[in-house]
Amino acid sequence: MSFEIERKFLVRSGDWQELATGRTSIRQAYLAFEQRASIRVRIKGDSTATLTVKSRPHELRRLELEYAVPVLEAEALMPLRLGSVIEKVRYAVPWGDLVWEIDVFSGENAGLIIAEIELRDEHQRFDLPAWIGAEVTGQSRYYNSALAQRPFGSWSRRDAPVSMEKLA
């Protein structure tokens, strides 16, 4: 059984871009999102796809079960989605002994950039790069399942974070 321990942050500048070592385009859709769990289908590039079940966060740790599925089957599941398709490019950015994942959203969530760091345990310490802004861990509106229901592009000016207004 697999658990995910991750923290999310807004990105305050583009200084991370020169440090990126990889990029992957991602399309994902939510087939279900309930109080206790979400089910999503994700296609990375055009070559791999997964079906994932995630529990809602309890503190920083949550259950995550992921299964490989054929891309054609993932494409067939996309129209069954609830809400919008999430489109983003994910960049890998090494920092210290960890790797940040920077998600640059497009489509209905264009203008939103979120950095995630996956940890070994809830109490693991790590250094914050200067390009990291406010922490949004636990703020449900920044989770992909919430962005599928209420895309960033539909947020009012007062709902949008200050650091994102500068980047948009």
Image: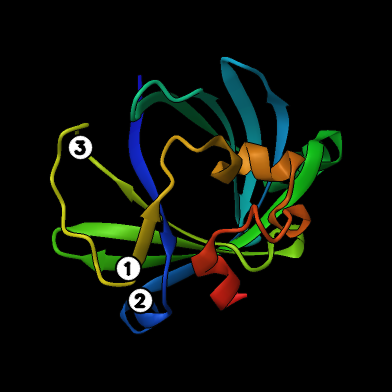
To which quarter of the image does residue 147 belong?
A: top right
Q: Secondary structure at mark 2?
A: helix
Work out whether 122 lies above or below 78.
above
Q: Position of residue 143 (x, y in %)?
A: 56, 41
The residue drawn where x is 61% and y is 25% is 38
Left or right relative to 20: residue 34 = right
**Residue 160 visible from this viewpoint:** yes
Which label lies toward us, 3 or 2?
2
Residue extending furthest toward the right: 79
Identify the amino acid type marked 1. Val
**Image-quadrant location for residue 123:** top left
Whole-Å distance between the Cαs marked 3 and 1? 17 Å
Coordinates of residue 18 in the picture (x, y in percent): 35, 84
Relative to 94, is 142 above or below? Answer: above
Q: Residue at x 63, y 68 (%)?
A: 111
Tag 2: residue type? Trp
Q: Label 3 neighbourhood size at 10 Å, few (<14), some (14-19), many (20+)?
A: few
The residue labelled by disc 2 is 16
On-image quarter of the C terminus: bottom right
Q: Which residue is at the front of the view, 87 or 49?
A: 87
Are discs 2 and 1 less than 8 Å apart at CB? yes
Q: Position of residue 64 (x, y in %)?
A: 44, 27
Q: Which residue is mark 1?
A: 93
- Looking at the picture, the colour scheme in use is rainbow
User: Which of the two residues, 157 or 45, is positioned nearer the viewer here?
Assistant: 157
Q: Are marks 3 and 2 in contact (CB under 8 Å)?
A: no
> Mark 3 sits on what residue?
120
